[in-house]
Amino acid sequence: MTIFEAYNSTKKRLEAVGIKDYVFEAKQIIMHVTGLKAAQILTDYNNQLTQFQENNLIALIHQREVHYPLQYIFGSWDFYGRPFKVGVGVLIPRSDTETVVEQSLEILKNTESPKVLDLCAGSGCIGITIDLEISDAKVTMIEKFDEALRYATENITLNNSSATVLKGDIFEKPQFENEIFDLIVSNPPYIPQNEMKYCSHEVKFEPETALLAEDEGLEFYKAIIKNYTPCLKVGGSFCFEVGFKQAEKVSELLNQNGFKDIKIKNDLNGIGRAVSGTK
Ligand SMILES: C[S@@+](CC[C@H](N)C(=O)[O-])C[C@H]1O[C@@H](n2cnc3c(N)ncnc32)[C@H](O)[C@@H]1O
């Protein structure tokens, strides 16, 4: 089978099972299987796949046909231009979450050697990115589940980050002293159970513990504000990722708890995605 044939048949099979970005995905899959760069797929289209590459391609298409996430198949996905290892048991980093990183960097732009806490760290994509974008930042991350914790640890090493990750549950008393952080950032689980039916097939392969939240999706924000406000310095900020239509509600929670300078930043689709407020 030539690269051209492999690319075309991959596109057709992904399209047939309703994968929206089948052209993009087919290209990514051929690049993954052959090790070629995007441009080489066009120039080397007449080259033959090896038997090993062909078998690998068939296995990979089978997985994708049942909507197993492409990111889990590859085992790695880019976030803010850096690779993050992913697999079953950890949330795949989303481009929406880059909005939260941008908002965090804006908040910290005039703070020297900022101390940052990333709650519900998952792959570590937020905490590790902030650590690498601000060279003198000191970033600590908290994650409850072992599988995700393992990915965060691997991603620290993969990206040569000096962030640290600890096991912890945000519903319990924090393991930190008062008033030590300049920023507490979090992308917690926020999907109400009754909205799971609107999620894609792919999302259903991700851990429910990373997605679902009680109390209309607000329980984590309430717990974090209650438990972690004492850990923020005066003048320090919370910065949260929020779900669809949650920005106003989370802003109101911050307002009710005495936070000032509350800001909502939209993602690339124009949806309020990051909410921050200052103590
Ligand atoms: C929405 S994911 C976010 C992961 C990562 N921060 C990101 O942006 O991709 C939420 C994370 O919270 C973790 N988590 C769930 N319940 C938790 C708890 N009670 N305490 C700490 N972490 C928790 C999940 O395991 C998951 O990794």
Image (tube, grey):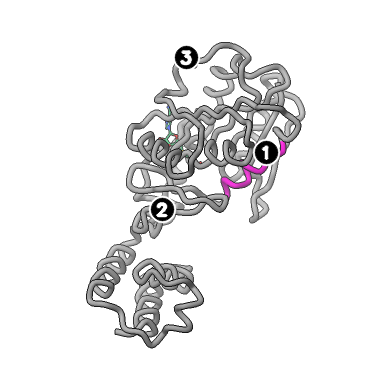
Secondary structure under tag 2 reads strand
Which residue is at 72% across, 38% downward?
A: 106
Name the amino acid, label 1.
Leu
Name the amino acid, label 3.
Lys
Distance from label 3 to label 2 (Cα)? 33 Å
Residue, disc 1: 105
Task: Specify whether residue 221 is painted magenta.
Answer: no
Q: Which residues are magenta?
A: 96-106
Secondary structure under tag 1 reads helix
Q: Earlier in the sequence, mark 3 or mark 1?
A: 1
Q: Regarding ligand 1, which quadrant of the image does it lie in? A: top left
Which residue is at 39% across, 28% downward?
A: 144
Residue, disc 2: 76
Residue 217 x, y percent position in the rendering: 51, 35
Image quarter of residue 52:
bottom left
Task: Specify whether residue 103 is painted magenta.
Answer: yes
Residue, disc 3: 173
Count of marks placed on residues: 3
- Position above or below: 120 against 265: above
Distance from label 3 to label 1 (Cα)? 27 Å
Q: Nearer the viewer, residue 22 or 166?
A: 166
Q: Nearer the viewer, residue 44 or 267?
A: 44
